Amino acid sequence: MIIDGCPAQLDVDLDYIQSELDKRKPGQSKITTQRKESDTVKILSGIFEGKTTGTPIAMLIPNEDQRSKDYTHNVDIFRPSHADFTYQVKYGIRDHRGGGRSSARETAARVAAGAIAKLLLKTQGVEIVAHVSSVGKINAPNVEIHSAQEFIDEREKNIVRCADPATAEEMIAYIDAVRKRGDTVGGKVSCYIQNCPVGLGEPVFDKLHADLGKAMLSINAVHGFEYGSGFEGSEMHGSEHNDIFLKNKQGDIVTRTNFSGGIQGGISNGMPIEFKVAFKPVATIMQSQPTVDSQGNEAEISGKGRHDPCVVPRAVPIVEAMAALVIADHWLRNRNSFIEVKG
Amino acid sequence: MIIDGCPAQLDVDLDYIQSELDKRKPGQSKITTQRKESDTVKILSGIFEGKTTGTPIAMLIPNEDQRSKDYTHNVDIFRPSHADFTYQVKYGIRDHRGGGRSSARETAARVAAGAIAKLLLKTQGVEIVAHVSSVGKINAPNVEIHSAQEFIDEREKNIVRCADPATAEEMIAYIDAVRKRGDTVGGKVSCYIQNCPVGLGEPVFDKLHADLGKAMLSINAVHGFEYGSGFEGSEMHGSEHNDIFLKNKQGDIVTRTNFSGGIQGGISNGMPIEFKVAFKPVATIMQSQPTVDSQGNEAEISGKGRHDPCVVPRAVPIVEAMAALVIADHWLRNRNSFIEVKG
Amino acid sequence: MIIDGCPAQLDVDLDYIQSELDKRKPGQSKITTQRKESDTVKILSGIFEGKTTGTPIAMLIPNEDQRSKDYTHNVDIFRPSHADFTYQVKYGIRDHRGGGRSSARETAARVAAGAIAKLLLKTQGVEIVAHVSSVGKINAPNVEIHSAQEFIDEREKNIVRCADPATAEEMIAYIDAVRKRGDTVGGKVSCYIQNCPVGLGEPVFDKLHADLGKAMLSINAVHGFEYGSGFEGSEMHGSEHNDIFLKNKQGDIVTRTNFSGGIQGGISNGMPIEFKVAFKPVATIMQSQPTVDSQGNEAEISGKGRHDPCVVPRAVPIVEAMAALVIADHWLRNRNSFIEVKG
Amino acid sequence: MIIDGCPAQLDVDLDYIQSELDKRKPGQSKITTQRKESDTVKILSGIFEGKTTGTPIAMLIPNEDQRSKDYTHNVDIFRPSHADFTYQVKYGIRDHRGGGRSSARETAARVAAGAIAKLLLKTQGVEIVAHVSSVGKINAPNVEIHSAQEFIDEREKNIVRCADPATAEEMIAYIDAVRKRGDTVGGKVSCYIQNCPVGLGEPVFDKLHADLGKAMLSINAVHGFEYGSGFEGSEMHGSEHNDIFLKNKQGDIVTRTNFSGGIQGGISNGMPIEFKVAFKPVATIMQSQPTVDSQGNEAEISGKGRHDPCVVPRAVPIVEAMAALVIADHWLRNRNSFIEVKG
């Protein structure tokens, strides 16, 4: 994985990057895949004496637990709702040992890169936090965020990464039951960006929420994205949806409500940025399913290998990482939005 | 508006482009803004004797009904849930005559460009159709699409652009009532892409649905995007969500269900591509609202000018246009996915 | 023509843009083409009350003197050393009315855009000046530049745009003689960038001189580019070519010589940037030449229309404009080279 | 190093990639640096059973002979005509152990990537060959190329990589003499592209020769680029410079002369593409030189380490590699220049 364009002189805390990766790695708990990998990151370039130098930052996370034989039964069979069929047609060739770039393993690189983006944003006071807000039909109540660190501490107390302890317990029990019957279930991750400066985002195609949406939809298994009032907002009236401006005690212009989700006209307005991401259930189930082979002949497939019964607990750091990359890019880009007029 | 990268030798039907623009133009009916503009498109370059030449295609849609004085009351006031405040902070300067690039007028260029993308895709048999699937809490039932043209014909029979006639009537009455009390309401547009070839989309960041999502979220007032099973899919189990492959009578590999929405691993699988877009209610209402001026002083604003009570009827051609641009880009890109191995 | 990414709040002097265009326009003197066009620029967007707003700047220069019939004799014939043949094969279609994008007219847009880049750079004290340093085998001596304005004033005193008056006279007489016998001749333009800040340019692919080189080579008729010691530098030894660093009276680190042409490791070092651009002779001559038609049949062509006997006098503003665009881009880009470490 | 966008199904010969790297590696002969590195390339992704899969191709060339202590004397001193000073100012931080991205070592990645581009182009019959055409003031006569392989065989018979044996001997003796007195010398590399299809290159900014020029100017130490008639062409008349079209025995449209260097209007015309690249003398010399430190204090520097007395013999594979990357990119891009009209 290579990051280009990171400014020089940023302090890089390698332990922090690793701790972020640890939240995504497999084998964390009974409700994640039992594959064991340390996902240890190694920095190849771009950092000298703890600081970025302006050189592209290359990081490598070696694959330690490669069991190609787990996949030999899939050589010529298209797994349902996987990318086997589309890759085969698109490229006319396919490396059957795992999913290649459609493997969730690909997201480790995103988390490592996102950790550096988070460090850059922290120098500006920006904090990005996410948690599991629903599993199947179990929904967490809205959580008020007092401080980013407290929120994370609360969330990390349970293995499903939901900041509401009562809901977390319910979710864990549910995922475990789903896992035992060889099935999987989907869920949602909610993300909050605090202290984002006003002005990030471009007015037309690269609206801040459009780039956040693309980033989220590029994560494996994501089927939906909404920000602010989202899909519910489409049922509201303008008179209730409009966020009224007012001056707060610090003299800043803020809004009374935040149906805009911190973004107006594609540009951050200083209010918390809020969005939600929907993940479909993992396609690999431990049950027998009919399918076809590459010639279209009928075949049968039964899940082997070690897979997640529910992807959202491990998706939390990925959502945060992708959000950080988008915000960092727009922060850099926005530094050229106007020139200082001298004199 | 300029399109670069359109292949040469494409037949361009100027009447078709204009007819697409006519579906977006203001002043169409009692449930759209009463502003009158012909939105007549003029081609400046790139087309010779009815065909594209490979030269960038420049098109101009002059602004005929510019009433700057409609906006003079807004010079120093931030309209709620508009981009006035964010533009002012981002650029330090603002052209107060209308919304600039945050004006919905900007979408006319998208429709004109999208019309050319549609013509390109039609040479490959790809058809893109959308309609209004909900207004406020009024939802249309699922509509089966037999032919793209029939669907469009049905949809164009009513002014709200819903392909279900009974729901359309209900929607129109509702929008009209909302309009009469000076308010606005949101809604949703559903889009279907038929006959899309297998293989479009890139495996990691530029997944087909990620680019579709970004394109939709870049349209004014959009607050959410979902494809295939979408947000509901996050409540399902893998065993019910997986799309089972089978060979159809024509010998093609298809899927029994289509929760994947025609896209697997970010790449089109040949099934219909289906997605839904949520629009918030229009922010300009004909009611008095509190706000602040650029110094943060309290102020009051009451909507003047001529605005839409509900944006979705005019958003239908915009959604189709943006979808066409994304699919056309990926179709061109995919032509280099592999090289033919000779002999 | 559209410029995107220009910062807001820049003062834009429309008269200045027009004066730059006037240096490129046809019909200026007996040694340029006799075509008459005012090349009047019209601003369509991006400027409000004399300042940029951050919106893309669209400018239009209408074609006033379009004489398509001047070109009807060329419909099916490939003019030697023109782009007729390559366009026909590349696109399979060709607009025979003039050269399309291979027409020198295309460079008017570059000059208009470059004028805005120059205005941006002037706010930073950067000055870009060029002149004709050779015509055919007539070479101007090296000119010392005291002030950019003086240099330009001197250059503009003669119609060939050479800052050395004696050489200018010789060049003018030579071009006029060439013109009278229906022939054309090549030449060179030398360009100097004064007060460029240290640090512009990227270390690997986007080296400052690589981007300058590409920009110059993208101008019609350019066949060569060199900077600093250039081709002669390849004949030198390291011991004579190395630019020794020293501290000047102002305390700045400068170099004793400037064989590096103001750029080291692809990055500006604060010394004047110097480069030279070679233009081939104009291909359209007023003499009869053999050629082929699109079927490869032998044909004969004799130049009609109104063309330049030597392109370099009108190329001077184009070279300056392209240099300004490159430097402005790198100046904006460099603002993110490092972050300020607080505390 | 990562290549993205290489089509799937290309046969990749790892030995070929390594053999290209061997032509660039240090320690080849008495006239190159005595640093010893095997430059062994390892493929990390993108190739499966000898073929590309469409996945990005990652290759790693570990640094074996890192002698950081060779550089400790330079920690706070700016080497003349190196990038030390410009990097320090641009980034405010500098890894003093070698030149970082300004190190010639960076070009190994270019050669490895270029080898894959060459393999892609070979499937289309395109051959790219270069040789040393001058060292200091010693110039090779023009060499006629009968076959690419013969040319390379001839060139590889001598350590300076000049395809003219007599000149090669003279060059070798000269470089050796320069080396013995601790000095360095510049030179030129000429490159020829055979069997390039008609139509590669874009008409305006991305002209084929503009992209070739940028690619060459991005190589360390390059100070000049010319193609076809180049700088000499600026001294010619149109009547002698125009390349007359004719139909050859095979029925192809060719040109009698090739002053256009195989490119007209920025687009390849099917004739051999010819260009020349000028390299300045290597800056590190084994002689004592005055300089300054980072505070501007006077200092002295004497070259240590192991450096090349003349860079051009090792630059030959780099020039070929960069040319291959540009041509491959434009070949891929050109596949979308027009659509086939059916029926």
Image (cartoon, coloured by chain):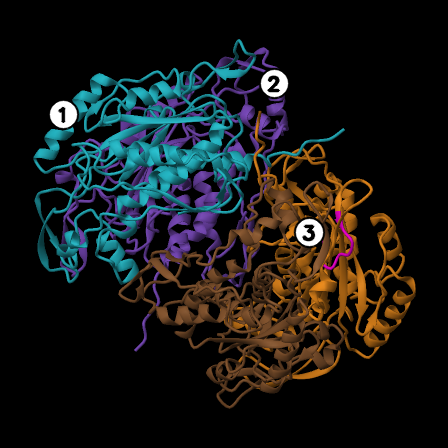
Chain colours: A orange, B brown, C cyan, D purple
Disc 1: which chain? Answer: C
**Compared with residue C264, is residue B30 higher up or lower down, i.e. above or below?**
below
Question: Disc 1 marks which residue?
Answer: C173
Residue A262 within the magenta-colored segment of the rendering: yes
Category of crowding for the residue at label 2, using alpha-carbon neighbours closer than 10 angstroms: few (below 14), some (14–19), many (at least 20): some
Nearer the observer, disc 1 or disc 2? Answer: 1
Disc 3: which chain? Answer: A
* Secondary structure mainly formed by the magenta segment: loop
Q: Nearer the viewer, residue D24 or C233?
A: C233
Circle 1 SS class: helix
Q: Is residue C33 left or right of residue B282?
A: left
Q: Which kind of residue does numbered mark 1 sit on?
A: Ala
Spot occupied by residue B99 in the image (x, y as percentages of width and height)? 57, 53
Q: Is residue A261 visible?
A: no
How far apart in space, not on screen, are marks 3 and 1 (Cα)? Answer: 69 Å
**Compared with residue A226, is residue C39 higher up or lower down, i.e. above or below?**
above
Q: Are marks 3 and 2 on the same chain?
A: no
Nearer the observer, disc 3 or disc 1? Answer: 1
Q: Nearer the viewer, residue C308 or A261?
A: A261
Residue appearing at x 10%, y 42% in the figure: C286
Residue D125 within the magenta-colored segment of the rendering: no
The image shows a total of numbered marks equal to 3
Instruction: Tell me where the magenta segment starts and ends, as one range.
Output: A254-263
User: Residue A61, labelled with which disc?
Assistant: 3
Question: Disc 2 marks which residue?
Answer: D294
